[in-house]
Structures are given as C-alpha cells and as structure tokens.
Image (cartoon, rainbow, N blue to C red):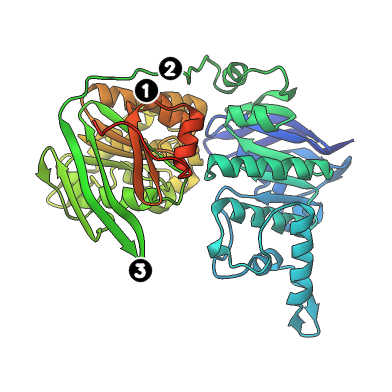
C-alpha cells in the first residue's frame, strides 16, 4: 500500500498555473526525491500535502484513505511532518523545549519537562541523532539543528516526513550524517520525501524519483537505480546540461585585491588570525573550508560589512576602507552567502531588489528621485536575461522560490560589472540549469579581467572553477596552490586541519 497518493492536483495562482493535473505516489518505507528546476512546483505540491496551501482540484489519499488537508494541524494528525529549508527554532531554548512546543506534556498546571526530556533523549538514542536533549539550540551546528527539526516532526508522530532542500545549508560532512539519519528512518518504516534539485544526492540517497517541470509531472516514481545524472538533468530542464565544463587560466594579470595582516576578534574570541590573501585580475581564487572556520566573517570584512581589529586592504594598489556602500561604489561586488539575511528585502518587489545598493546611481535616480521607468525597464531586461521565473517584476521577492531569489541577487551583482567580485555560495539553492548559467557567467567575468574570490561549501564547484585554491581553517589561510595540485582527499585533510602546506601565493 502507498503511504501517499495525490491524484489530479491543480493549483492556479492569478497569473501562474503552479500545478497542472499532477499525480504523485510514495510507497511506505521509501526515500522519494522530487526533482525540478526553481519554480517547477516542488514546494507547492508538498505544501498542498502538508496543508500550507489548498489545491483547486484533485484528491489526496493517506494509507489508502481519502483525506482533506486544509491546515498543517490536520496533516500532523495524519502523521505527516515537514522540515522547512529555513529552520523554525528558537535559539535560546533547549532542544527539548523546541521539540515539545505546542505539544507539551503537563503535570497538573505545569509542563512536565522531566518526562518530555526523557522521551526526547530516548528518541535521540533510538535514531542515533547524537545531540543533547538539554542543550540550547544556539550551541548546535546547522546539521544538528536540522535533526532537532526532524525530531519535532517525529515527536508528533510523523510517519511521512517531507524535507525541503535538506542539504542546502549543510557542509559535505553534515550531508553524509543526514543521509545516515535518513537511512535509519527508512529502516524504521518511515516514508521520506525530499524536495531537491541536487542530482548527485538524489542518486546517492533516493529509491525513486519524480520530476516536475513548469508545474507538470514529467516522470513519476522512476527507480533511481540505472538513471545517470545526465538523464535526470535532461528530465529536469528539457535539455542537456554540462556541469563538468571548466576553463582554467594560468596567465592572470596584476594583483587586483590584496589583504594583509587581517585580525578579527568577536566577544574576546579570535576569529580571523593574521590572514593574508590576494587575487589577480583575470583570476578566480577559491576558498575551501568547513563552515564555521571564519568564512562568514572574512566575507563581511572584505565587503565592508564588518570592521576588523586590523587589516591592510588594497584594491589596485590603493587602500580601501569604509562601509558596504563605499565598497560597492569602489567596484567590489558581493553575492552574499545568506540571501535572506544579506541579499534581499523580501517584502519589496523584484524591481526594487534588483537595484538594491545601486539605487542611487544616476541611471536609477535623479537628485534622490526614482526614475521609475528606467528601473522597471532594467528589471524586466534582467529578469529575462537571468531567467527569473515570475509573472512580473512588481511581484514581491517573498513570492519567489529560493532559487529564483538567488537569481535576482546574481542579476543585480553581475549587471553592475564589478572589478572585484566576492562570490559567497553563488549557486546555493539553485537548480542545475541555473548552476550551469552562473558558472558560465563567473568564468566570463574572469576572462574579462575581473578578479573573483569564490567561497563555497561545494568542493566540486571550488575545484572546477578556481584557478587557485586557498584553504581556510581556524581563521587562517593554511594552504594555497594551483587548482590541480590537490586531489579531493588531500583538500579534505587540509580543511580539517590535518595538514598544512601548499605552494606560494601567486
């Protein structure tokens, strides 16, 4: 018997048919991947199943029985749980407090925390989650926080678990740990649905795959075994996608951006320590490292968002300092690693976001007054060029899928033709077609003589695009060399502090 059956699901928005007569089934005790481009309808379909939105047509069966799900509370009562891409946890509360909120056991007039903590600890032990039931969430890694979200669903009796882009914010090590957890849950009889666009991970973890394209189910319940990454990509985007291409460059120009003696202390803790790096014109310098080793703070310093304790920063041999606006005006572009925190103001329209930070330029404003026509035309041109899926540029950014939000940021930064680009996680949350496009544009910028610092948790991306690779560990650059000097194992060893070395800075 199937755990989930969805028949003839239709969801129509005013200008978009998000789901067009979609059929979808999940077997008991399987891991089922839903693949699709950004805006293909993956999250919408699962939001219908979880009761976050209602369909206009169609029916849902859970364990063979027709059900009506119009609110998440109804889905939870039916044994459906959902872990969202952006976690819904309260950092100052403990693991147990976060898990039981809304479903607290009581003893008289009081919450029975002791009983709850014991039950949570037993669940942690049962599923080998390796976290402390009484630890505060703010002390946990991103991967551990995700396990808390999974536990929240399991605590409420979930037998069907929906994970929305579960690996988008995880390190490679955390991805492997998550997959161990998912296999354990599958062995316990849970049905797991993964919303994703990552082909490699679908191959590794899923039993079957269903592919959505523009709201239409292209293929449903296809066994993953025997499907190549190229097969899956072709189904997703309707054309061949080449993510293996690269073109390295060994003849860079003069130094464009140089950092020396960078030190940063936060709340008495040294975060960046005597850090030095430089990138040349016509060069991509990739920075590899496990998240939490100073990358975020380095990005903030290099884009004027944070003032260090000490640093010498030179652009084209001239000192550069000031705030983020000063860095932008000096030709330092920034693709932020967290699009919601640093990249977008989601209640604003696409056209407002696509000029954010550059809104005072003469082409967009005259003496502080917006040039509405020019802004609108620019936004429409860039939405078309960067293939942002939206009915129009007046839509709020909050209405876009995560990948399309990322495309808005990419469009904004690339269109301003920066001399130096700090690209942090540039393809996080985007589909394979968009990855190919962004990678190609990064290489084009490099070939035009631009200097690019690429910070990414995706080692394949770093190794494929970078002309040189620097490794950051514990707030220091511990090694730097040409792109082809280290294999993946050697690079992994450097990233974990197991080895120091490498060629001289070029």
Residue positioned most to the bottom? 109
Q: Which of the image's four quarters has the N terminus?
A: top right
Name which of mark 3 and mark 2 comes first in the sequence: 2
In this rendering, position of residue 326 left or right of residue 130: left
Q: Identify the residue at horizontal 36%, vertical 51% (top origin).
A: 475
In this rendering, position of residue 110 left or right of residue 174: right
Which x, y percent locates residue 420?
23, 36
Q: Contact, CB < 8 Å: mark 2 with mark 1?
A: yes
In this rendering, position of residue 10 left or right of residue 410: right
Cα–Cα gap, marks 2 and 1: 9 Å
Name which of mark 2 and mark 1 comes first in the sequence: 2
In this rendering, position of residue 23 left or right of residue 213: right
**Which residue is identified by label 1?**
440
Occupied quadrant, residue 395: top left
Which x, y percent locates residue 433?
48, 24
Cα–Cα gap, marks 3 and 1: 42 Å
Cα–Cα gap, marks 3 and 2: 44 Å
**Which residue is identified by label 3?**
268
Occupied quadrant, residue 131: bottom right
Closer to the eye: label 2 or 1: 2
Q: Which mark is residue 245?
A: 2
Does residue 450 show up? yes
Occupied quadrant, residue 417: top left
Which x, y percent locates residue 102?
70, 68
Name which of mark 3 and mark 1 comes first in the sequence: 3
SS assignment at label 1: helix
SS assignment at label 3: loop
Closer to the eye: label 3 or 2: 3
Mark 2 surroundings within 10 Å by alpha-carbon count, few (fewer than 14), some (14 through 19), many (20 or more):
few
Which x, y percent locates residue 103?
74, 68
């Amino acid at each position: 018997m199937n755990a989930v059956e969805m028949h003839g699901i239709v969801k129509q928005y005013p200008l978009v048919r998000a789901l067009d007569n979609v059929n979808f089934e999940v077997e008991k005790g399987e891991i089922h991947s839903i693949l699709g481009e950004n805006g293909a309808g993956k999250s919408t379909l699962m939001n219908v199943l979880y009761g976050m939105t209602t369909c206009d047509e169609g029916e849902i069966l859970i364990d063979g029985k027709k059900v009506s799900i119009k609110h998440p509370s109804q889905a939870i009562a039916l044994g459906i749980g959902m872990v969202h891409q952006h976690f819904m946890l309260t950092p100052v509360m403990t693991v147990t407090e976060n898990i039981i909120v809304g479903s607290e056991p009581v003893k008289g007039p009081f919450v029975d925390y002791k009983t709850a903590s014991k039950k949570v600890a037993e669940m942690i032990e049962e599923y080998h989650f390796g976290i402390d039931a009484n630890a505060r969430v703010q002390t946990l890694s991103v991967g551990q926080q995700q396990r808390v979200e999974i536990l929240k669903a399991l605590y409420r009796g979930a037998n069907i678990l929906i994970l929305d882009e579960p690996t988008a914010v995880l390190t490679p090590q955390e991805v492997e740990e998550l997959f161990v957890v998912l296999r354990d849950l599958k062995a316990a009889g849970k049905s797991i649905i993964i919303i994703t666009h990552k082909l490699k991970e679908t191959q590794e973890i899923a039993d079957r795959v269903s592919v959505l394209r523009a709201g239409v189910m292209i293929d449903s319940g296809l066994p993953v075994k025997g499907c190549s990454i190229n097969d899956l990509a072709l189904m997703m985007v309707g054309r061949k996608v080449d993510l293996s291409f690269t073109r390295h460059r060994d003849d860079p120009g003069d130094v464009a951006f140089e950092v020396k003696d960078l030190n940063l202390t936060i709340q008495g803790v040294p975060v960046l320590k005597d850090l030095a790096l430089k990138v040349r014109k016509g060069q991509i310098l990739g920075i590899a490292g496990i998240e939490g080793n100073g990358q975020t703070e380095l990005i903030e310093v290099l884009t004027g968002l944070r003032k260090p304790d000490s640093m010498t920063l030179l652009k084209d041999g001239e000192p550069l300092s000031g705030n983020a606006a000063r860095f932008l005006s000096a030709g330092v572009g920034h693709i932020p690693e967290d699009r919601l925190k640093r990249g977008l103001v989601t209640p604003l329209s696409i056209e407002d976001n696509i000029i954010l930070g550059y809104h005072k330029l003469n082409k967009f404003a005259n003496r502080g007054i917006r040039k509405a026509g020019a802004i609108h035309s620019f936004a429409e041109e860039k939405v078309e060029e960067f293939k942002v899926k939206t009915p129009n540029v007046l839509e709020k950014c909050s209405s876009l899928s995560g990948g399309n939000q990322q495309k808005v940021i990419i469009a904004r930064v690339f269109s301003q033709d920066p001399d130096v680009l700090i690209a942090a996680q540039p393809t996080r949350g985007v589909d394979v077609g968009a990855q190919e496009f962004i990678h190609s544009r990064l290489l084009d910028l490099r070939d035009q003589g631009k200097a690019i610092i690429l910070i990414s948790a995706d080692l394949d991306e770093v190794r494929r695009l970078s002309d040189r690779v620097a490794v950051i560990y514990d707030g220091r650059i511990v090694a730097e060399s040409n792109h082809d000097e280290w294999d993946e194992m050697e690079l992994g060893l450097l990233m974990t502090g197991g080895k120091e070395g490498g060629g001289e800075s070029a």
